[in-house]
Image (spheres, rainbow, N blue to C red):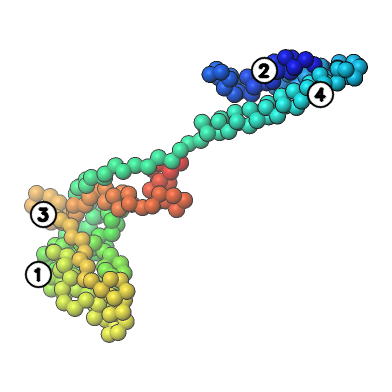
Protein backbone atom coordinates (compact mmCIF):
# COMPACT_ATOMS: atom_id res chain seq x y z
CA UNK A 1 0.00 0.00 0.00
CA UNK A 2 1.31 3.44 -0.91
CA UNK A 3 2.37 5.77 1.93
CA UNK A 4 -0.36 8.22 0.94
CA UNK A 5 -2.99 5.45 1.22
CA UNK A 6 -1.67 4.46 4.66
CA UNK A 7 -1.75 8.08 5.79
CA UNK A 8 -5.35 8.50 4.64
CA UNK A 9 -6.46 5.40 6.58
CA UNK A 10 -4.69 6.65 9.72
CA UNK A 11 -6.37 10.06 9.40
CA UNK A 12 -9.77 8.39 8.90
CA UNK A 13 -9.16 6.23 11.96
CA UNK A 14 -8.31 9.28 14.03
CA UNK A 15 -11.59 10.89 12.95
CA UNK A 16 -13.59 7.75 13.71
CA UNK A 17 -11.95 7.39 17.14
CA UNK A 18 -13.44 10.65 18.31
CA UNK A 19 -10.16 12.63 18.38
CA UNK A 20 -9.88 16.32 17.53
CA UNK A 21 -8.13 16.76 14.19
CA UNK A 22 -7.35 20.28 12.95
CA UNK A 23 -9.88 21.79 15.34
CA UNK A 24 -12.78 19.49 14.21
CA UNK A 25 -14.50 17.13 16.69
CA UNK A 26 -15.62 13.70 15.51
CA UNK A 27 -18.01 11.29 17.17
CA UNK A 28 -17.13 7.82 18.38
CA UNK A 29 -16.97 5.15 15.61
CA UNK A 30 -19.65 2.56 15.15
CA UNK A 31 -18.77 -1.12 15.06
CA UNK A 32 -19.46 -1.18 11.27
CA UNK A 33 -17.05 1.72 10.70
CA UNK A 34 -14.34 -0.02 12.74
CA UNK A 35 -14.72 -3.26 10.80
CA UNK A 36 -14.68 -1.43 7.45
CA UNK A 37 -11.46 0.46 8.25
CA UNK A 38 -9.71 -2.68 9.44
CA UNK A 39 -10.91 -4.68 6.41
CA UNK A 40 -9.58 -2.07 3.99
CA UNK A 41 -6.18 -2.04 5.67
CA UNK A 42 -6.04 -5.83 5.81
CA UNK A 43 -7.09 -6.18 2.17
CA UNK A 44 -4.36 -3.84 1.03
CA UNK A 45 -1.78 -5.86 2.95
CA UNK A 46 -2.91 -9.14 1.33
CA UNK A 47 -2.87 -7.62 -2.13
CA UNK A 48 0.65 -6.36 -1.64
CA UNK A 49 1.90 -9.87 -0.74
CA UNK A 50 1.56 -10.99 -4.39
CA UNK A 51 4.09 -8.36 -5.62
CA UNK A 52 7.80 -8.86 -5.97
CA UNK A 53 10.42 -7.91 -3.39
CA UNK A 54 10.69 -4.41 -4.81
CA UNK A 55 7.27 -3.69 -3.30
CA UNK A 56 8.20 -4.96 0.19
CA UNK A 57 8.55 -1.45 1.59
CA UNK A 58 4.95 -0.72 0.64
CA UNK A 59 3.83 -3.91 2.37
CA UNK A 60 5.63 -2.94 5.57
CA UNK A 61 4.08 0.50 5.49
CA UNK A 62 0.65 -1.04 5.00
CA UNK A 63 1.10 -3.35 7.97
CA UNK A 64 2.28 -0.45 10.10
CA UNK A 65 -0.74 1.63 9.07
CA UNK A 66 -3.13 -1.21 9.93
CA UNK A 67 -1.57 -1.63 13.39
CA UNK A 68 -1.70 2.11 14.01
CA UNK A 69 -5.35 2.18 12.97
CA UNK A 70 -6.31 -0.59 15.40
CA UNK A 71 -4.43 1.07 18.27
CA UNK A 72 -5.98 4.49 17.63
CA UNK A 73 -9.48 3.01 17.36
CA UNK A 74 -9.05 1.22 20.67
CA UNK A 75 -7.77 4.35 22.40
CA UNK A 76 -10.60 6.44 20.96
CA UNK A 77 -13.24 3.96 22.14
CA UNK A 78 -11.76 3.98 25.66
CA UNK A 79 -11.78 7.79 25.75
CA UNK A 80 -15.40 7.89 24.59
CA UNK A 81 -16.41 5.39 27.28
CA UNK A 82 -14.65 7.45 29.97
CA UNK A 83 -16.35 10.65 28.80
CA UNK A 84 -19.77 8.96 28.89
CA UNK A 85 -19.13 7.76 32.45
CA UNK A 86 -18.12 11.25 33.55
CA UNK A 87 -21.25 12.76 32.02
CA UNK A 88 -23.53 10.20 33.65
CA UNK A 89 -21.93 10.47 37.10
CA UNK A 90 -23.93 12.38 39.73
CA UNK A 91 -21.60 14.71 41.58
CA UNK A 92 -21.93 15.34 45.32
CA UNK A 93 -23.68 18.58 46.21
CA UNK A 94 -22.68 20.51 49.30
CA UNK A 95 -24.76 23.25 50.81
CA UNK A 96 -23.94 26.00 53.27
CA UNK A 97 -27.54 27.15 53.55
CA UNK A 98 -28.23 28.62 56.99
CA UNK A 99 -31.13 26.95 58.79
CA UNK A 100 -33.16 29.60 60.60
CA UNK A 101 -35.22 28.94 63.75
CA UNK A 102 -38.90 28.10 63.35
CA UNK A 103 -40.63 28.50 66.72
CA UNK A 104 -43.95 26.72 67.22
CA UNK A 105 -46.14 25.81 70.16
CA UNK A 106 -46.13 22.01 70.34
CA UNK A 107 -48.75 20.11 72.32
CA UNK A 108 -47.38 17.73 74.95
CA UNK A 109 -50.43 15.50 75.27
CA UNK A 110 -50.42 16.14 79.03
CA UNK A 111 -53.04 18.17 80.88
CA UNK A 112 -51.84 20.72 83.42
CA UNK A 113 -53.99 19.08 86.09
CA UNK A 114 -52.19 15.77 85.59
CA UNK A 115 -48.91 17.10 87.02
CA UNK A 116 -48.58 17.92 90.70
CA UNK A 117 -45.91 20.07 92.37
CA UNK A 118 -42.38 18.56 92.20
CA UNK A 119 -43.52 16.22 89.44
CA UNK A 120 -42.20 16.20 85.88
CA UNK A 121 -42.47 14.26 82.64
CA UNK A 122 -40.18 13.65 79.65
CA UNK A 123 -41.40 13.69 76.04
CA UNK A 124 -39.84 13.87 72.55
CA UNK A 125 -41.34 16.91 70.84
CA UNK A 126 -40.34 18.00 67.32
CA UNK A 127 -37.24 15.82 67.56
CA UNK A 128 -36.13 17.35 70.88
CA UNK A 129 -36.05 15.62 74.28
CA UNK A 130 -37.95 17.89 76.68
CA UNK A 131 -38.39 17.60 80.44
CA UNK A 132 -41.33 19.61 81.83
CA UNK A 133 -43.26 19.80 85.10
CA UNK A 134 -43.93 21.93 88.16
CA UNK A 135 -41.60 23.17 90.86
CA UNK A 136 -42.39 22.85 94.56
CA UNK A 137 -44.20 26.21 94.33
CA UNK A 138 -46.36 24.95 91.44
CA UNK A 139 -44.66 26.96 88.65
CA UNK A 140 -44.47 25.33 85.23
CA UNK A 141 -41.06 24.80 83.62
CA UNK A 142 -39.60 23.11 80.54
CA UNK A 143 -35.93 22.25 80.06
CA UNK A 144 -33.76 20.12 77.80
CA UNK A 145 -33.65 16.53 79.02
CA UNK A 146 -29.94 15.89 78.37
CA UNK A 147 -27.95 16.78 81.49
CA UNK A 148 -24.26 17.69 81.15
CA UNK A 149 -21.56 16.54 81.22
CA UNK A 150 -22.54 13.14 79.74
CA UNK A 151 -26.10 13.77 78.52
CA UNK A 152 -27.94 11.52 80.97
CA UNK A 153 -31.74 11.90 81.05
CA UNK A 154 -33.41 13.55 84.05
CA UNK A 155 -35.93 10.71 83.91
CA UNK A 156 -33.17 8.45 85.29
CA UNK A 157 -33.18 9.42 88.96
CA UNK A 158 -33.61 13.17 88.54
CA UNK A 159 -35.25 15.10 91.39
CA UNK A 160 -36.69 18.59 91.82
CA UNK A 161 -35.25 20.62 94.69
CA UNK A 162 -37.05 23.94 94.94
CA UNK A 163 -36.41 25.62 91.56
CA UNK A 164 -33.49 23.35 90.63
CA UNK A 165 -33.35 20.01 88.92
CA UNK A 166 -30.80 17.63 90.46
CA UNK A 167 -29.12 15.19 88.10
CA UNK A 168 -28.61 11.91 89.97
CA UNK A 169 -25.50 10.59 88.23
CA UNK A 170 -23.03 13.33 89.21
CA UNK A 171 -25.13 15.44 91.59
CA UNK A 172 -25.25 18.58 89.40
CA UNK A 173 -28.04 21.11 90.00
CA UNK A 174 -29.63 23.26 87.28
CA UNK A 175 -32.01 26.17 87.66
CA UNK A 176 -35.12 25.18 85.69
CA UNK A 177 -35.84 28.78 84.61
CA UNK A 178 -32.39 30.06 83.67
CA UNK A 179 -30.78 26.72 82.83
CA UNK A 180 -27.60 27.70 84.68
CA UNK A 181 -25.81 25.23 86.97
CA UNK A 182 -25.77 25.95 90.69
CA UNK A 183 -23.39 24.76 93.41
CA UNK A 184 -20.44 22.44 93.00
CA UNK A 185 -19.87 20.85 89.60
CA UNK A 186 -19.88 17.01 89.54
CA UNK A 187 -19.59 16.47 93.32
CA UNK A 188 -20.57 12.77 93.07
CA UNK A 189 -19.13 10.21 93.20
CA UNK A 190 -16.42 11.81 95.39
CA UNK A 191 -13.38 11.06 93.19
CA UNK A 192 -14.85 9.69 89.96
CA UNK A 193 -17.12 12.69 89.51
CA UNK A 194 -14.21 15.13 89.43
CA UNK A 195 -12.29 12.85 87.07
CA UNK A 196 -15.23 12.75 84.64
CA UNK A 197 -15.61 16.53 84.88
CA UNK A 198 -11.93 17.04 84.06
CA UNK A 199 -12.14 14.61 81.14
CA UNK A 200 -15.20 16.40 79.71
CA UNK A 201 -13.62 19.86 79.96
CA UNK A 202 -13.91 20.66 83.68
CA UNK A 203 -16.33 23.52 82.95
CA UNK A 204 -19.86 23.83 84.30
CA UNK A 205 -22.42 23.70 81.50
CA UNK A 206 -25.96 25.05 81.30
CA UNK A 207 -29.07 23.31 79.96
CA UNK A 208 -31.65 24.59 77.47
CA UNK A 209 -34.88 26.15 78.69
CA UNK A 210 -38.22 26.50 76.87
CA UNK A 211 -41.40 28.54 77.18
CA UNK A 212 -44.37 26.54 78.47
CA UNK A 213 -48.06 27.43 78.77
CA UNK A 214 -51.50 25.97 79.40
CA UNK A 215 -53.76 25.87 76.37
CA UNK A 216 -57.18 27.51 76.55
CA UNK A 217 -58.27 31.05 77.35
CA UNK A 218 -58.64 30.36 81.07
CA UNK A 219 -55.79 27.87 81.31
CA UNK A 220 -56.04 24.46 82.87
CA UNK A 221 -55.90 22.74 79.48
CA UNK A 222 -53.21 20.81 77.68
CA UNK A 223 -49.61 21.92 78.21
CA UNK A 224 -47.85 23.40 75.19
CA UNK A 225 -44.12 24.10 74.79
CA UNK A 226 -42.54 26.55 72.36
CA UNK A 227 -39.90 24.66 70.37
CA UNK A 228 -37.69 25.45 67.41
CA UNK A 229 -38.86 22.81 64.92
CA UNK A 230 -35.65 23.33 62.92
CA UNK A 231 -33.39 22.65 65.90
CA UNK A 232 -32.64 19.05 64.93
CA UNK A 233 -31.89 19.95 61.30
CA UNK A 234 -29.67 22.87 62.36
CA UNK A 235 -27.73 20.61 64.72
CA UNK A 236 -27.13 18.00 62.02
CA UNK A 237 -26.18 20.63 59.43
CA UNK A 238 -22.66 20.75 60.86
CA UNK A 239 -22.14 17.00 60.46
CA UNK A 240 -19.25 15.91 58.26
CA UNK A 241 -20.42 15.02 54.74
CA UNK A 242 -19.17 11.65 53.52
CA UNK A 243 -19.74 7.94 53.83
CA UNK A 244 -21.01 8.25 57.40
CA UNK A 245 -22.93 11.46 56.72
CA UNK A 246 -26.31 11.73 58.41
CA UNK A 247 -27.54 14.86 56.68
CA UNK A 248 -26.53 14.01 53.12
CA UNK A 249 -28.25 10.64 53.20
CA UNK A 250 -31.37 12.26 54.64
CA UNK A 251 -31.81 15.17 52.25
CA UNK A 252 -30.26 13.50 49.18
CA UNK A 253 -27.34 15.89 48.72
CA UNK A 254 -24.81 13.09 49.18
CA UNK A 255 -26.03 11.10 46.17
Q: Is residue 163 above or below residue 29?
A: below
Check contact, mark 2 vs mark 3: CB within 8 A: no
Secondary structure under badge 1? loop
**Which of the marked residues, 2 or 3, is nearer the chain's N terminus?**
2
Disc 4 marks which residue? 60
Q: Nearer the viewer, residue 165 or 52?
A: 52
Across and down, in percent, residue 101 comes to: 22, 47
Give the image quarter of residue 92: top left
**Which of the marked residues, 4 or 3, is nearer the chain's N terminus?**
4
**Which of the marked residues, 3 or 1, is nearer the chain's N terminus?**
1
Q: Is residue 190 above or below residue 125?
A: below
**Which of the marked residues, 2 or 1, is nearer the chain's N terminus?**
2
Residue mark closest to the camera, 4 vs 2: 4
Give the image quarter of residue 164: bottom left
Q: CA distance from mark 3 to mark 1?
A: 18 Å
Identified at 70% across, 29% down, the residue is 71
Disc 2 marks which residue? 12
**Which of the marked residues, 4 or 2, is nearer the chain's N terminus?**
2
Disc 3 marks which residue? 219
Q: Nearer the viewer, residue 8 or 84?
A: 8
Secondary structure under badge 3? loop
Check contact, mark 3 vs mark 1: CB within 8 A: no
Classify the position of the N terminus by image quarter: top right
Q: Does any portion of residue 187 appear in the rendered image? A: yes
The label on residue 18 is: none
The label on residue 137 is: 1
Across and down, in percent, residue 93 comes to: 40, 40
Identified at 15% across, 51% down, the residue is 215
Residue mark closest to the camera, 2 vs 1: 2
Amino acid sequence: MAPRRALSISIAACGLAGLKLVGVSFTAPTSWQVRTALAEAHGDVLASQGHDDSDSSGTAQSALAAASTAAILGMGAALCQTNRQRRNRTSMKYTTKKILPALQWIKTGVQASEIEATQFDVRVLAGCDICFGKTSSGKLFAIGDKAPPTGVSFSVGGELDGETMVEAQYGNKFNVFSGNPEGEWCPNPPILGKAIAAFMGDEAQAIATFEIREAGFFGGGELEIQIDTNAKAAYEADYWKGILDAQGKNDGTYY
